[in-house]
Each structure stands twice: as C-alpha cells, then as structure tokens.
C-alpha cells in the first residue's frame, strides 16, 4: 500500500473515531450527572406541523406552577404528529405543561372569551373542561433511572 493511500485511510479512521462520541451524546435538556434521572416524554395528537410545541417543566411548588418565571426548564421543538424528547432532572416531583404554538409567536394564544385558541396538554392528562388543573392533578414523581410520560394534545376548537 502506498504512503498516500495509508494516509487517506488513517485520516478516515481518525475522523470516524472522533465522530463516534458526538453520535453517542444525549440530546436531553439539562445536565446529566451521576444523580440525575432521565425524564422522557411523548406528545401525541398534534394536529399540524405548523409552528412549534413548547414543553415547560415546573417544580413541585404551587406558587411557581404556570406562573411567569416559575419554570424549571423548557423545550421548544418543531411541531409534528408526535413530539418526543427528554430532560435530565434531579429526582423529585414535577409537572409538565405543553402547548402547540401553531403560529410561532411564542405565546399561548386565547380567544376573545379567554379559552385556549391553540392545542395544550398536561402531565397525567387531567380533565380540563373548566379552568386550569391543580398542581396535584398534574404532579408526577421522578426517581432514579428513567421516567416516561405520554401526553395527549387537546384542542378546544
């Protein structure tokens, strides 16, 4: 084998080995540590691929739940029929609120009478016919290891 061919093979091998760690990296939000747990979610029933889906994770604190500035973490991802993702979190209790920002204005739009104009959902898929759910209805626990949630998007119109 010529020196030129060996150099090409060596360069290719080094390039592939250096790319391998990047392929193995986790794309979850948050910082993975020896004490963190993986919270995976799947949101189903998204009506269109317009805009994005915002997933907001709240700590187990009534004062912070759905309050401006109260979030623990947020992920925004392109809308599609099913959205999947994850967070790295310390073990504890949390609540997850989602909405389909179909017009991409990064705001949860409401009708003139105050009803949701965009799709929404919560962890535990509570009944939300009248008003917002209580934190106790959407709270869930994350222990060590991995916790998976499945949330159904709801549309009122």
Image (cartoon, rainbow, N blue to C red):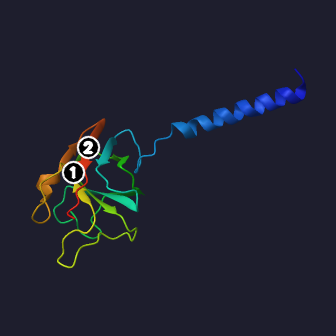
Q: Residue furthest left?
A: 130
Q: Residue at x 19, y 55 (%)?
A: 60
**Mark 2 surroundings within 10 Å by alpha-carbon count, few (fewer than 14), some (14 through 19), many (20 or more):** some
**Numbered tag placed on residue 42 in the rendering:** none
> Residue 100 appears at what percent x and percent y?
32, 61
Q: Nearer the viewer, residue 80 or 95?
A: 80
Q: The N terminus is located in which quarter?
A: top right
Residue 150 falls in image quadrant: top left
Residue 3 falls in image quadrant: top right
Describe the element under mark 1 as helix, strand or loop.
loop
Q: Residue at x 83, y 26 (%)?
A: 6
Q: Nearer the viewer, residue 110 or 16?
A: 110
> Residue 33 appears at what percent x and percent y?
40, 42
Q: Residue furthest bottom?
A: 112
> Residue 59 appears at what percent x and percent y?
24, 56
Residue designated by label 1 = 123
Describe the element under mark 2 as helix, strand or loop.
strand
Q: Is residue 26 left or right of residue 132?
A: right
Q: Nearer the viewer, residue 132 or 17?
A: 132
Q: Nearer the viewer, residue 42 or 34?
A: 42
Q: Residue at x 26, y 43 (%)?
A: 149
Mark 1 near mark 2, Cβ–Cβ under 8 Å?
yes
Q: Is residue 66 left or right of residue 10?
A: left
Q: The C terminus is located in which quarter?
A: bottom left
Residue designated by label 2 = 149
> Residue 143 appears at what percent x and percent y?
24, 39
Up-down relation of residue 18 to residue 128 (above or below): above
Residue 156 falls in image quadrant: bottom left
Mark 1–mark 2 Cα distance, whole angstroms, equals 7 Å
Q: Residue furthest top?
A: 1
Q: Earlier in the sequence, mark 1 or mark 2?
A: 1
């Amino acid at each position: 084998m010529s020196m030129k061919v060996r150099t090409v093979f060596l360069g290719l091998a080094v390039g592939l080995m250096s790319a391998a760690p990047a392929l193995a990296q986790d794309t979850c939000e948050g910082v993975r540590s020896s004490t963190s747990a993986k919270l995976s979610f799947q949101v189903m029933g998204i009506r269109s691929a317009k805009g994005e889906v915002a997933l907001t994770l709240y700590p187990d604190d009534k004062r912070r739940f759905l309050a401006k500035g109260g979030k623990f973490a947020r992920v925004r991802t392109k809308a599609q029929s099913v959205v999947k993702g994850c967070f790295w979190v310390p073990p504890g209790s949390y609540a997850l609120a989602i909405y389909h920002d179909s017009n991409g204005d990064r705001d949860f739009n409401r009708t003139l009478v105050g009803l949701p104009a965009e799709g929404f959902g919560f962890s535990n898929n509570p009944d939300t016919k009248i008003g917002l759910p209580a934190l106790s209805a959407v709270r869930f626990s994350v222990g060590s290891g991995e916790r998976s949630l499945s949330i159904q998007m709801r549309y009122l119109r």
